[in-house]
Image (spheres, coloured by chain):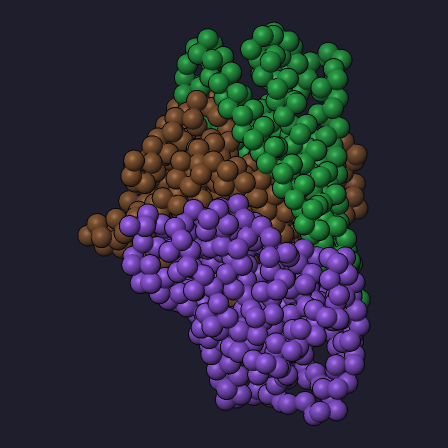
Amino acid sequence: QDKPVNLKMSSWVPAQHPLNPALQAWADDIKKASGGTITATLFPSEQLGKAFDHYDMARDGIADLAYVNPGYQPGRFPIMAGASLPFLFSNGKSGSAAIDAWYRQYAAKEMKDIKVCFAFVHDPGTFHARKKITLPTDINGMKIRPATSTIGQMVTLLGGTNVQASAPAARDALEKGVADAITFPWGSIILFGIDKVVKYHIDVPLYVTPFVWGMNKDKYESMSAAQKKVIDDHCTSEWAEKVAANWADYEAAGKGKIAAEAGHEVYKLTPEQLDAWRKAVAPVEGTWAEGVKKTGEDPKAVLDNLKASLVKYKAAL
Amino acid sequence: MSTDLVAVIGFVALFALMLLRVPVGMAMGLVGVVGYSYVVGVWPALKLVGQTSLRTVSDYTFGVIPMFMLMGAIVTVSGVSRELFKAANSMIGHMRGGLGAATVLACGGFAAISGSSVATAATFSNVAYPEMRRFKYPESFSTGVIAAGGTLGAMLPPSTVLAVYAILTEQDIGKLFMAGIIPGLLAMAMYVLTIAIIVRVRPDWLPRGEQKPWRERFADLKSVWAPLALFIFVIGGLYGGFFTPTEAGGVGATGAFLLGIARRRLDRAKIREALLSATRTAAAVFTVLIGALLFGYFLTVTQTPQKITDFLVHLGIGRYGVLVVLMLMYLALGCLMDAMAMIILTVPIVFPVITHLGFDPIWFGIVIVMTVELGLITPPVGMNVFVIKSVVDRVSFATIFRGVAPFVLTDIIRLAIIIAFPVLAMWLPSRM
Amino acid sequence: MQQATTPNLTDRIIGTIEWLAAISVGVVALNIFVSVVLRKFFSTSIPDAYDFGRMLLSILIFWGIAATSYRGGHITVDLLWSAVGPRAKRAIDVFATLMLLVFVIMQTAMLFDKVRLTRIDNVLTYDLNLPTWPFYAVAWTGDACAVILIAVRTWRLIFAPDKLHDEGYETAHPSIEESKS
Ligand code: NA
Ligand code: NA
């Protein structure tokens, strides 16, 4: 008989966020598979620690499992940052399977302090603005609240200014003109009431934010072989996609809702326009590559692997 | 040991340490770390100390606290309270009870640019008390009106206590500030009314002050432009959304500084004093914040907040019954600690109850701050009263509490009004 | 606040630390002011103003805590303390200062760990990609000073209370107006 284990799972998003039920379902399935010996308690809303610290919390055993946004600490996880480069992912579901399959080869090295259970992404976000943005040159002189530091670099590169604001404060910043635009996934725009203050939305999968569901190593090691197997069976690319699905659906559904609202313009880019964007933001990749070189990896190979994985899982843009 | 028992022992240890004068922040931190070690493990607990300390002090949102403290400290050393009192006194000091009403008005004016209740009480102990005594106002009334007027500092925006409440509950600081305006103005009106009633009942008690010619009175009134401009700039800018709360604090502090320089109210010594004072208050408050977070993480892993919520919600005394229980608890805590420490310690535990019962978080912020401030002026122990005593040493506590009693009564009525008519707090923020 | 004694070394150190912390408060305010002006009127920003603000804040708070701890300016519950006689008062003071020392030693050790890891993990600022650890190291220095100064305070409190009194132990409390809010 295996020793009963209770896992403290930490998620920094608020209780009502669509990710939380998916994480709970993941834990419930583990409970079933382990014959009830592995149970879990989910702590949402930063109850165990701040969003910024979730990697360290998993490392230090403050949480047994933690929802990590590696991008919160620019420079710390340079390989993973590759997934936040613009115009790579077409969708969040198979994109999650793709990033997980890709990151498995680097996780043990780049996130060596924790057991990476799986990596995943949210459904791609885009520019939502008070005035119409179609070409990269439109960014010049605009004040933008970026989603990640990579998008922030892109904004700076295109002559814009970054405005930092937490997600709840972002609406206010946009309403009062502190910011002119935001990069956000679609459903979250409605969730935070930002659809009341921005009218123009480019219908292009601009970026995703990569995340990791990470486990404390000692906790994992303390388990019996049978229990470890249950955990391993739940740390797969399939589960990455399953956990991400709920949230991805939620975000993707936001696009239709916004398009249906009066006074909103949701517009696609022509292939030429998209090409212009890809060219204009290319230098961001160079900056990223510099960071990867320091780790001893070949940035080109890393990115090619990611692209191959995206193609394989039908998640490439 | 069950986690419930661990949590109870934690609370007992916390109060024991605090009574033994271990600083509130360190007491919460120590109990939090020891309790967390017991429940989770020593190493995670120690790691939590480093992580929580660093994250708290480098959180941009928390930056609003030292910034408004700096603004308050600069206007304090610039002698604004004296100008405000002089202006109010010129206008109404010649009426019966006029000096008292002038104190209330000047406290309100000062509160509009300073975020601290205790600082407001302290500065007017220096400014208004001697003047009231000069015109033979009783010691009890003179100290009582200052103690009550001081509480305006935390109600009228800016307010550091409201800002901390907003951060802890993830509410909009700007909205909480706006929510405090009408209850604050109501407080001023009711304090003045209280004085008018006292004058009716005891006509000889509060004699007339001196009457100045109109020219002089207008000249005194003119100096009000500077604090008024600062208020409109900072609170108006926040209301209009020109800047975020942290920015409002930083811009307000810089504005107060520039105004002080331009009006020759600041010299090197005063600037130094203001900077040091803001640093000290901020350091003291952040210590409590760090400690409270550590204590809070300990409570979280014992799942205490959920259990307390469940307990109170299923008590069968209704939502207003629970509200009254909570308010009585705050009045009791008011005997132990100051407003900031009380808010930081209790809000993470109490807030889930409030949201569960369906009360509005902004409205509750106003109610809780009013209650906490009431605790500062009620016997047996109240921080505002202590501060006044430290400045005006000859007066006994009993005298001050006697003087503040009519205002306490007013405050209780006002609290009932705000609870009965939440719209008084909610209307302005809803217009943002 | 002080009697007319010449300030000794610890007082001078603490004075300097506190003054540096105080200057940081002013710089944080100025940083915000300039950022707002640049954004409003020139649609531009100081690179990393946000991160600089945060890191300056950490310096000011830790250095401020050092000074506050030494001067006994923390928020305390004085209900029991003010009700007992001088001997019990002293016992309470010794106990409280020892607890303060324990906490600050723990905090300083774990902060060192945090700063060390921030360096190893190569955490950078948002815009300019500068390493963040040097800022935190400076902040940590404040906490380290706090340990030494509280140790000095504790030692004097136990073995040389007269000396502490000479330094204005009773009166050197920052006035309540300053230490409470
Ligand atoms: Na105020
Ligand atoms: Na009281």
Relative vertical location of residue A136 with respect to residue C58 in this rendering, above or below? below
Percent coordinates x, y for residue B245 in the rendering: 61, 56
Identify the residue at horizontal 60%, vertical 53% (top origin). Answer: A112
Percent coordinates x, y for residue B44 in the rendering: 49, 41
Relative vertical location of residue A261 with respect to residue B148 in this rendering, above or below? below
From the rendered image, report the letter of the chain displayed in brown. Answer: B
Q: Is residue A72 left or right of residue B392?
A: right
Extreme front residue here?
Answer: A225
Quadrant position of residue C169: top right
Number of numbered tags placed on the structure image: 0
Identify the residue at horizontal 34%, vertical 38% (top origin). Answer: B7
Residue B257 visible in the picture? no
Which one is in front, A90 or A264?
A90
Residue B316 visible in the picture? yes
Q: Is residue B33 left or right of residue A37?
A: right
Which one is in front, C157 or A288?
A288
Which one is in front, B77 or B64?
B64
From the rendered image, report the letter of the chain displayed in green. Answer: C
Q: Is residue B396 left or right of residue C118?
A: left
Identify the residue at horizontal 61%, vertical 32% (top origin). Answer: C109
Q: Quadrant of the C terminus of chain A?
A: bottom right
From the rendered image, report the letter of the chain displayed in purple. Answer: A
Quadrant position of residue C145: top right
Relative vertical location of residue B163 with respect to residue A306 in this rendering, above or below? above
Percent coordinates x, y for residue B316 in the rendering: 19, 52
Identify the residue at horizontal 79%, vertical 46% (top origin). Answer: B262
Quadrant position of residue C15: top right
Percent coordinates x, y for residue C162 in the rendering: 61, 7
